[in-house]
Image: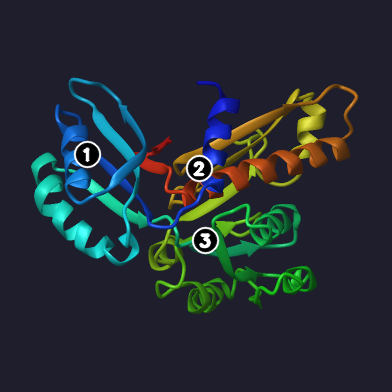
Amino acid sequence: MTGAVLSALRAQESSSGVTDTARLLVSCADRPGIVAGVSRFLVERGANIVQSDQYSTNPESGSFFLRVVFHLPGVSARLDELSEQFAVEVAQRFGSDFEFHDAARPKRVAIMVSRYDHCLLDLLWRTSRGELPMEIGAVVSNWGDLRDEVTRFGVPYHEIPVTRATKATSESAQLDVLGGGRYDLVILARYMQILSDDFLRRVGCPVINIHHSFLPAFAGAGPYERAKERGVKLIGATAHYATADLDEGPIIEQDVTRVSHRATTRDLVRAGADVERSVLQRAVRWHCEDRVLLHGNTTVVF
């Protein structure tokens, strides 16, 4: 299946009605009967499976991943009950991890940003148009530059300065805004600070980061200037889950665009911003549509 066809199918599901619709994610060691067991469980409760995707790393000794979208009247009020029953009737039998998600409930999202606005404004704009299945509850920044832009969208803006001397205190203040189970996802939309391991443990939800794909070749300051000097022909971006290992978390999405010797450094920066926007919004969309399953330090994206 081509990338264009896959994107079209995903967009079709995203735009379709989600009332009385839920998603079930399953991961376990592969063995016969998993799909039959999951399907039987849903059908016996009156559910109609409307989409199913599965993947096995190896049919004899691999890991198995399944994403099922199903319609069931009143499912929003039944998810806890379904989860308890599934744990006993299916998950114990196959030794599986699983999650049920209400497709009608947008993910609660917060964004962290510094001074670059391209990814932030793209996410705010797409969310305001109903293009992303999420609700943005807060923007946290270590600068005040983007306050006016954000407040135009009716989103609270929290300026929390960060210096080397105040990092621990600043992260504590950030957690006062972001922690406590308030959010399902935090997005680093070009937040130019390194988050501590303690922050990532305490924030209580996944964190998605975006950065240029020059790493590790042009790490540090001035990557586009050095890329121009080296004569690169591809500008790329990577969206991944943030972990304790800097910029090494499980990759969700990547893309590139071609540039030529005629491109100036400014052209490279503009091309990089374009690809960062598109990569980040796809990664965020897929996460919010419960399409991403972790497999060690990699991902399976349905």
Counting from the top left corner in percent of width and height, residue 265 is at: 86, 37
- For the point 48% across and 74% down, the residue is 175
Counting from the top left corner in percent of width and height, residue 140 is at: 62, 70
Give above or below for 249 relative to 226.
below
Question: What separation in Å lies between label 1 and label 3 (alpha carbons)?
Answer: 33 Å
Question: What separation in Å lies between label 1 and label 2 (alpha carbons)?
Answer: 20 Å
The answer to whether residue 255 of the structure is visible from this angle is yes
Give above or below for 164 relative to 287.
below
Q: Which of the pair 125/193 is nearer the observer?
A: 125
Q: Identify residue for label 2.
A: 13
Chain-order first, disc 1 or disc 3: 1
Residues marked 1 and 3 touching at CB (< 8 Å): no
State the SS at label 3: strand
Question: What separation in Å lies between label 2 and label 3 (alpha carbons)?
Answer: 24 Å
Chain-order first, disc 1 or disc 2: 2
Graded by Cα atoms within 10 Å as few (under 14), some (14 to 19) or many (20 or more), the crowding at tag 1 reads some
State the SS at label 2: helix
Q: Identify residue for label 1.
A: 39
- Type of amino acid at the residue the image marks with label 2: Glu
Counting from the top left corner in percent of width and height, residue 131 is at: 63, 52
Q: Which of the pair 94/227 is nearer the observer?
A: 94
